Amino acid sequence: MFDLVILKPRLCLLCDQGITQRVSWKNLLMKEQEVSICAECFGKLDPISGELCQICSRVLSAEFRRDTLCLDCHRWEQDPDWKGFLTENQSLFHYNDFMKESIAKFKYRGDYAIAVAFSTFIKDALEKLEFDSVAVIPLSEERLLERGFNQAEALVVTAGQTCIQPLTRIHSEKQSKKSRRDRLNLPQVFQITEPQMIAGKKILLIDDIYTTGSTLRHAAKALKLAGATEIRSLTLAR
Protein backbone atom coordinates (compact mmCIF):
# COMPACT_ATOMS: atom_id res chain seq x y z
CA MET A 1 0.00 0.00 0.00
CA PHE A 2 1.43 3.37 -0.98
CA ASP A 3 2.04 6.07 1.63
CA LEU A 4 -0.33 8.94 0.91
CA VAL A 5 1.27 12.33 1.48
CA ILE A 6 -0.86 15.41 2.19
CA LEU A 7 0.43 18.96 2.17
CA LYS A 8 -1.09 20.57 5.22
CA PRO A 9 -0.76 24.37 5.56
CA ARG A 10 -0.31 25.69 9.10
CA LEU A 11 0.75 28.98 10.62
CA CYS A 12 4.02 29.53 12.46
CA LEU A 13 3.22 30.40 16.06
CA LEU A 14 6.00 32.99 16.13
CA CYS A 15 5.52 34.92 12.87
CA ASP A 16 2.06 33.80 11.63
CA GLN A 17 3.44 32.87 8.22
CA GLY A 18 2.33 29.66 6.57
CA ILE A 19 4.09 26.34 7.16
CA THR A 20 3.77 23.54 4.64
CA GLN A 21 4.20 20.27 6.49
CA ARG A 22 4.35 16.83 4.94
CA VAL A 23 1.89 14.52 6.67
CA SER A 24 1.77 10.78 5.90
CA TRP A 25 -0.59 8.01 6.99
CA LYS A 26 2.10 6.83 9.39
CA ASN A 27 2.44 10.04 11.39
CA LEU A 28 -1.29 10.72 11.18
CA LEU A 29 -1.97 7.37 12.88
CA MET A 30 0.89 7.78 15.37
CA LYS A 31 -0.14 11.39 16.11
CA GLU A 32 3.41 12.63 15.89
CA GLN A 33 3.95 16.20 17.03
CA GLU A 34 3.33 18.81 14.38
CA VAL A 35 5.83 21.51 13.51
CA SER A 36 4.81 24.82 15.07
CA ILE A 37 7.78 27.05 14.09
CA CYS A 38 8.73 27.81 10.51
CA ALA A 39 12.26 27.25 9.25
CA GLU A 40 12.96 30.98 9.09
CA CYS A 41 12.03 31.56 12.74
CA PHE A 42 13.87 28.41 13.82
CA GLY A 43 16.98 29.80 12.17
CA LYS A 44 16.71 33.01 14.21
CA LEU A 45 16.87 31.14 17.52
CA ASP A 46 20.34 31.13 19.08
CA PRO A 47 20.78 28.13 21.41
CA ILE A 48 23.20 28.63 24.28
CA SER A 49 26.28 26.43 23.94
CA GLY A 50 29.98 26.38 24.62
CA GLU A 51 31.83 26.74 27.93
CA LEU A 52 29.22 28.01 30.37
CA CYS A 53 29.15 29.39 33.90
CA GLN A 54 28.42 26.46 36.20
CA ILE A 55 25.64 28.38 37.91
CA CYS A 56 23.86 30.66 35.43
CA SER A 57 24.59 29.26 31.92
CA ARG A 58 26.32 32.41 30.75
CA VAL A 59 28.92 31.80 28.04
CA LEU A 60 32.27 32.33 29.75
CA SER A 61 34.78 34.81 28.41
CA ALA A 62 38.35 35.40 29.54
CA GLU A 63 37.64 38.88 30.93
CA PHE A 64 34.35 38.03 32.63
CA ARG A 65 35.04 34.89 34.63
CA ARG A 66 36.42 33.60 37.91
CA ASP A 67 37.43 29.97 37.40
CA THR A 68 34.23 28.10 36.43
CA LEU A 69 31.88 30.99 37.26
CA CYS A 70 31.04 34.22 35.49
CA LEU A 71 31.91 37.39 37.38
CA ASP A 72 28.27 37.99 38.36
CA CYS A 73 27.81 34.56 39.93
CA HIS A 74 31.20 34.83 41.62
CA ARG A 75 30.02 38.05 43.28
CA TRP A 76 26.73 36.46 44.35
CA GLU A 77 28.57 33.51 45.86
CA GLN A 78 30.99 35.77 47.70
CA ASP A 79 28.07 37.42 49.48
CA PRO A 80 27.16 35.43 52.64
CA ASP A 81 23.55 36.60 52.30
CA TRP A 82 23.22 34.87 48.91
CA LYS A 83 25.80 32.09 48.76
CA GLY A 84 24.42 28.68 47.89
CA PHE A 85 20.73 29.47 47.45
CA LEU A 86 20.57 28.93 43.67
CA THR A 87 22.46 25.75 42.79
CA GLU A 88 22.22 26.08 39.02
CA ASN A 89 20.25 27.77 36.26
CA GLN A 90 19.86 26.41 32.75
CA SER A 91 18.81 28.78 29.98
CA LEU A 92 17.98 27.54 26.50
CA PHE A 93 18.44 30.51 24.15
CA HIS A 94 20.33 33.78 23.94
CA TYR A 95 18.11 36.81 24.44
CA ASN A 96 18.78 38.16 20.96
CA ASP A 97 16.55 40.62 19.08
CA PHE A 98 14.30 37.86 17.76
CA MET A 99 13.83 36.29 21.18
CA LYS A 100 13.26 39.72 22.72
CA GLU A 101 10.43 40.40 20.28
CA SER A 102 8.94 36.92 20.76
CA ILE A 103 8.90 37.25 24.55
CA ALA A 104 7.46 40.76 24.32
CA LYS A 105 4.54 39.36 22.28
CA PHE A 106 4.19 36.62 24.88
CA LYS A 107 4.31 38.74 28.04
CA TYR A 108 2.98 42.14 27.09
CA ARG A 109 0.63 41.43 24.18
CA GLY A 110 -0.94 38.28 25.60
CA ASP A 111 0.06 35.89 22.81
CA TYR A 112 -0.30 32.59 24.71
CA ALA A 113 0.54 30.61 21.55
CA ILE A 114 4.19 31.62 22.01
CA ALA A 115 4.34 29.19 24.93
CA VAL A 116 3.12 26.41 22.64
CA ALA A 117 5.82 27.30 20.12
CA PHE A 118 8.54 26.68 22.70
CA SER A 119 6.86 23.76 24.48
CA THR A 120 8.99 21.09 22.79
CA PHE A 121 12.21 22.80 23.88
CA ILE A 122 10.96 23.14 27.47
CA LYS A 123 9.75 19.55 27.55
CA ASP A 124 13.09 18.22 26.30
CA ALA A 125 14.96 20.26 28.93
CA LEU A 126 12.67 19.07 31.74
CA GLU A 127 13.29 15.45 30.82
CA LYS A 128 17.02 15.93 31.40
CA LEU A 129 16.75 17.63 34.79
CA GLU A 130 16.34 16.07 38.23
CA PHE A 131 13.74 17.57 40.57
CA ASP A 132 10.93 16.62 42.91
CA SER A 133 8.56 19.46 42.03
CA VAL A 134 8.33 22.33 39.57
CA ALA A 135 7.43 25.80 40.79
CA VAL A 136 7.03 28.95 38.71
CA ILE A 137 8.04 32.51 39.45
CA PRO A 138 4.69 34.04 40.44
CA LEU A 139 3.22 37.34 39.31
CA SER A 140 1.59 39.72 41.73
CA GLU A 141 -2.22 39.80 41.59
CA GLU A 142 -2.04 43.18 39.86
CA ARG A 143 0.39 41.97 37.19
CA LEU A 144 -1.58 38.76 36.64
CA LEU A 145 -4.76 40.77 36.09
CA GLU A 146 -2.92 43.03 33.67
CA ARG A 147 -1.41 40.22 31.58
CA GLY A 148 -4.16 37.62 31.88
CA PHE A 149 -1.80 34.69 32.55
CA ASN A 150 1.53 33.85 34.13
CA GLN A 151 4.02 33.35 31.28
CA ALA A 152 6.23 31.02 33.34
CA GLU A 153 3.25 28.81 34.18
CA ALA A 154 2.26 28.79 30.50
CA LEU A 155 5.68 27.41 29.58
CA VAL A 156 5.26 24.60 32.10
CA VAL A 157 1.66 23.71 31.25
CA THR A 158 2.17 23.65 27.48
CA ALA A 159 5.16 21.34 28.02
CA GLY A 160 2.83 18.89 29.78
CA GLN A 161 4.29 19.37 33.25
CA THR A 162 2.30 20.12 36.41
CA CYS A 163 3.58 22.71 38.85
CA ILE A 164 3.11 23.70 42.46
CA GLN A 165 2.57 27.26 43.63
CA PRO A 166 4.19 27.68 47.05
CA LEU A 167 5.15 31.32 46.43
CA THR A 168 3.27 34.60 46.26
CA ARG A 169 4.68 37.88 45.08
CA ILE A 170 4.33 41.37 46.45
CA HIS A 171 3.37 43.89 43.76
CA SER A 172 6.30 46.01 42.59
CA GLU A 173 7.40 48.09 39.64
CA LYS A 174 8.02 46.13 36.44
CA GLN A 175 11.47 44.53 36.34
CA SER A 176 11.96 45.78 32.77
CA LYS A 177 11.82 49.36 34.09
CA LYS A 178 14.48 48.81 36.74
CA SER A 179 18.18 49.43 36.26
CA ARG A 180 20.65 46.62 36.79
CA ARG A 181 21.69 48.12 40.13
CA ASP A 182 18.06 48.36 41.27
CA ARG A 183 17.44 44.71 40.37
CA LEU A 184 20.47 43.60 42.35
CA ASN A 185 19.30 45.51 45.42
CA LEU A 186 15.65 44.49 45.48
CA PRO A 187 14.06 43.77 48.85
CA GLN A 188 12.54 40.32 49.24
CA VAL A 189 9.34 40.25 47.16
CA PHE A 190 8.37 36.58 47.66
CA GLN A 191 6.50 34.91 50.47
CA ILE A 192 5.94 31.21 51.13
CA THR A 193 2.27 30.26 51.41
CA GLU A 194 2.52 26.47 51.32
CA PRO A 195 5.72 25.36 53.11
CA GLN A 196 4.55 21.74 53.26
CA MET A 197 4.76 21.60 49.46
CA ILE A 198 8.50 22.14 49.44
CA ALA A 199 9.86 20.76 52.72
CA GLY A 200 12.71 18.34 52.01
CA LYS A 201 12.28 18.60 48.24
CA LYS A 202 14.42 19.54 45.26
CA ILE A 203 12.60 22.38 43.51
CA LEU A 204 12.95 23.44 39.89
CA LEU A 205 12.00 27.08 39.33
CA ILE A 206 10.72 28.16 35.91
CA ASP A 207 10.82 31.68 34.47
CA ASP A 208 10.97 33.18 30.99
CA ILE A 209 14.21 35.20 31.20
CA TYR A 210 17.36 35.16 33.33
CA THR A 211 18.64 38.73 33.44
CA THR A 212 20.70 39.53 36.53
CA GLY A 213 19.58 36.45 38.45
CA SER A 214 18.09 38.59 41.21
CA THR A 215 14.48 37.38 40.82
CA LEU A 216 15.44 33.71 40.77
CA ARG A 217 17.78 34.09 43.73
CA HIS A 218 15.15 35.87 45.80
CA ALA A 219 12.70 33.06 45.07
CA ALA A 220 15.36 30.41 45.71
CA LYS A 221 16.27 32.01 49.04
CA ALA A 222 12.63 32.05 50.17
CA LEU A 223 12.20 28.39 49.19
CA LYS A 224 15.45 27.25 50.77
CA LEU A 225 14.78 29.03 54.05
CA ALA A 226 11.33 27.41 54.11
CA GLY A 227 12.79 23.91 53.94
CA ALA A 228 13.55 23.03 50.31
CA THR A 229 16.84 21.12 49.99
CA GLU A 230 17.99 22.33 46.57
CA ILE A 231 16.87 24.97 44.09
CA ARG A 232 17.64 24.87 40.39
CA SER A 233 16.04 26.92 37.65
CA LEU A 234 15.18 26.75 33.97
CA THR A 235 14.53 29.77 31.78
CA LEU A 236 13.70 30.11 28.12
CA ALA A 237 16.33 32.78 27.52
CA ARG A 238 19.16 34.77 29.06
Image: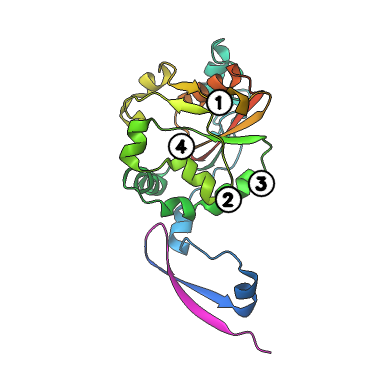
Do callouts 4 and 1 mark residues in contact (Cβ within 8 Å)? no
Instruction: Residue under label 4, please give it.
Output: 209
Do callouts 3 and 2 mark residues in contact (Cβ within 8 Å)? no
Instruction: Residue under label 1, please give it.
Output: 194
Looking at the image, is mark 1 or mark 2 nearer the viewer?
Answer: 1
Between 104 and 166, the one lying in front of the other is 166
Question: How far is disc 3 from disc 1 in space, using C-alphas?
Answer: 26 Å
Between 44 and 200, the one lying in front of the other is 200
Q: Quadrant of residue 176?
A: top left
Between 225 and 176, the one lying in front of the other is 225
Which amino acid is tagged 3? Glu
Residue 35 vertical placement versus 76 (above, below): below
Q: Which of marks 4 and 3 precedes in the sequence?
A: 3
Question: In this image, 57 relative to 106: left or right?
Answer: right
Residue 205: where, in percent of width, then height?
A: 55, 33
First to last magenta residue range? 1-15
Question: How far is disc 4 from disc 2 in space, using C-alphas?
Answer: 20 Å
Do callouts 3 and 4 mark residues in contact (Cβ within 8 Å)? no
Which structural element holds mark 2?
loop
Q: Which of marks 2 and 1 precedes in the sequence?
A: 2
Give the label on residue 56, or none.
none
Which amino acid is tagged 2? Gly
Count of numbered circles on the image: 4
Question: How far is disc 1 from disc 2 in space, using C-alphas?
Answer: 23 Å
Which structural element holds mark 1?
loop
Which structural element holds mark 3?
helix
Instruction: Residue under label 2, please give it.
Output: 160
Do callouts 1 and 2 mark residues in contact (Cβ within 8 Å)? no
Residue 109 vertical placement versus 138 (above, below): below
Between 120 and 136, the one lying in front of the other is 136
**Residue at 57% across, 13% down:** 78
Question: How far is disc 3 from disc 4 in space, using C-alphas?
Answer: 20 Å
